[in-house]
Image: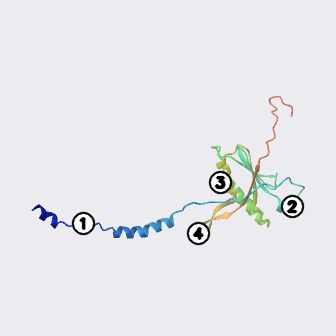
């Protein structure tokens, strides 16, 4: 009797054809949608050597000096155009910097000056993230064109340098000679 029961049982087959079909389609789709790496290359130039005499406005550089308490936009080089103080939380005001750069770009285009370069001068203690955020802010801004958001160009050619030292102001109250 025992042998009869064993003979009547059949082995169950596992059918994985449907699973294999799904995997054949799913794996390539997932691999195509996967971003393996994104590499961004920033082409930077070092600032040119000392300025020799007065040049025309079209050849002048736009400068952005990053200080601990503010950012100073100079145009032409050495002439203060606007000082942007830090926010009350003592963080750089990137929104105001972006608006200032947009206004400067608009002013230059009205005078038929096509300026694409900017020199960023920073103090040695400037945090790296601040430098990256400043570069992103001065290179482009988000603009709406034909119901879609695009990156509008401001000053894509960025050069770096050291900020000039602040001049010491004598303290008259402490009895220093002016």
Q: How crowded is mark 4: few (under 14 residues within 10 Å), some or many (20 or more)?
A: few
Distance CA(mark 4)–CA(mark 3): 22 Å
Q: Which mark is residue 95?
A: 3
Camera-nearest label, 1 or 4: 1
Q: Residue at x 38, y 68 (%)?
A: 20
What residue did someone put label 4 on?
147
Circle 1 — which element?
A: loop
Locate residue 16, reporting x and y percent. Answer: 33, 67
Q: Earlier in the sequence, mark 4 or mark 2?
A: 2
Distance CA(mark 2)–CA(mark 1): 89 Å
Locate residue 154, reporting x and y percent. Answer: 71, 61
Camera-nearest label, 2 or 1: 1
Distance CA(mark 3)–CA(mark 1): 68 Å
What residue did someone put label 2 on?
56
Q: Dividing the image into 4 quarters, which one contains the C terminus?
A: top right
Left or right? Give the position of 62 relative to 151: right
Depth order, front residue of 157/134: 157
Q: Can residue 92 be seen in this view?
A: no
Camera-nearest label, 3 or 1: 1
What residue did someone put label 1 on?
12
Residues at badges 4 and 3 in contact (C-beta under 8 Å)? no
Residues at badges 4 and 2 in contact (C-beta under 8 Å)? no
Above or below, 173 against 18 in this view is above
């Amino acid at each position: 009797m025992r042998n009869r029961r064993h003979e009547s049982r059949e082995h169950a087959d596992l059918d994985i054809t449907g699973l294999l079909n799904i995997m054949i389609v799913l794996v390539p789709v997932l691999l195509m949608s996967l971003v393996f790496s994104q590499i961004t290359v920033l082409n930077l130039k070092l600032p040119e050597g000392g300025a020799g005499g007065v040049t025309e406005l079209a050849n002048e550089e736009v400068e952005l000096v990053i200080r601990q308490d503010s950012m100073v936009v100079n145009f032409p080089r050495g002439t203060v155009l606007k000082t942007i103080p830090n926010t009350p939380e003592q963080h750089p005001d990137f929104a105001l910097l972006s608006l200032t750069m947009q206004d400067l770009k608009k002013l230059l285009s009205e005078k038929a000056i096509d300026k694409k370069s900017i020199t960023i001068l920073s103090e040695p203690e400037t945090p790296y993230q601040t430098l990256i955020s400043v570069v992103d802010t001065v290179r482009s801004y988000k603009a709406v064109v034909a119901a879609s958001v695009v990156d509008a160009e401001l000053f894509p050619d960025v050069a770096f340098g050291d900020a000039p030292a602040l001049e010491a102001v004598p303290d008259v109250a402490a009895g220093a000679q002016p």
